Image (spheres, grey):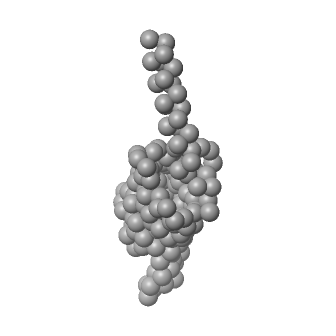
Amino acid sequence: MKRIFLITGLLIGGLFTTNAQDISDDAIGVRFGSNDGFGGEISYQHKLSETNRLELDLGWRNNSSTDAYKLAGIYQWVWTLGDQFNWYAGFGGGVGNWKNKNVDSSQTLLFAAGNVGIEFDLDIPLLISLDYRPEIGFNDIYDGLNSDIALGLRYQF
């Protein structure tokens, strides 16, 4: 019985070691989503520990009536699904600014965010992800629940 516990412990420890190798130190790229007009984001991920990382995303919108940007920060936990697949979940928030060009008014926006997704780590230093990010805004322009489904492409280094 003691041998079974020992072997099980070694196998679980090996899984956590394998998981540690799946998170790159840094990754930068783009995140294509559609959250309330904030379609594209520049995305950066930084490894904090063997199973955690921080993701920073800068999104913007510019058209004939609106200039807007938002910066989101998400703390994520990462788990191994298979050889090159991971899934992750996290929480965070952000800040931004929304300017209406037609009436020359500007407003700061604040939001809280969650995040859950799946990623595929290619043999080349490219990470492809698909995630869902619900955001709750706290002002007149960006209020209530805003959902975002996005495809991410990031270069790992």
Residue 28 versus residue 116 in the image, above or below: below
The percent coordinates of residue 121 (x first, y second) are 47, 58
Which residue is rendered at x = 51% and y = 20% of the image?
A: 6
Determine whether, in the image, residue 34 is placed left or right of residue 56: left
The percent coordinates of residue 26 (x first, y second) are 61, 59
Which residue is rendered at x = 40% and y = 66% of the image?
A: 151
Identify the image quadrant of the C terminus.
bottom right
Q: Which of the pair 38/11 is nearer the observer?
A: 11
- Image quadrant where residue 63 sits: bottom left
Q: Which of the pair 16/55 is nearer the observer?
A: 16
Identify the image quadrant of the N terminus.
top left
Residue 59 versus residue 53 in the image, above or below: below
- Residue 101: in sight, yes or no? yes
The percent coordinates of residue 117 (x first, y second) are 40, 53
Which residue is rendered at x = 36% and y = 62% of the image?
A: 149
Residue 103 versus residue 145 in the image, above or below: below
Q: Which of the pair 77/50 is nearer the observer?
A: 50
Residue at far top of view? 1
- Residue 71: in sight, yes or no? no
Total marks in image: 0
Q: Which of the pair 123/153 is nearer the observer?
A: 123
The percent coordinates of residue 156 (x first, y second) are 57, 63
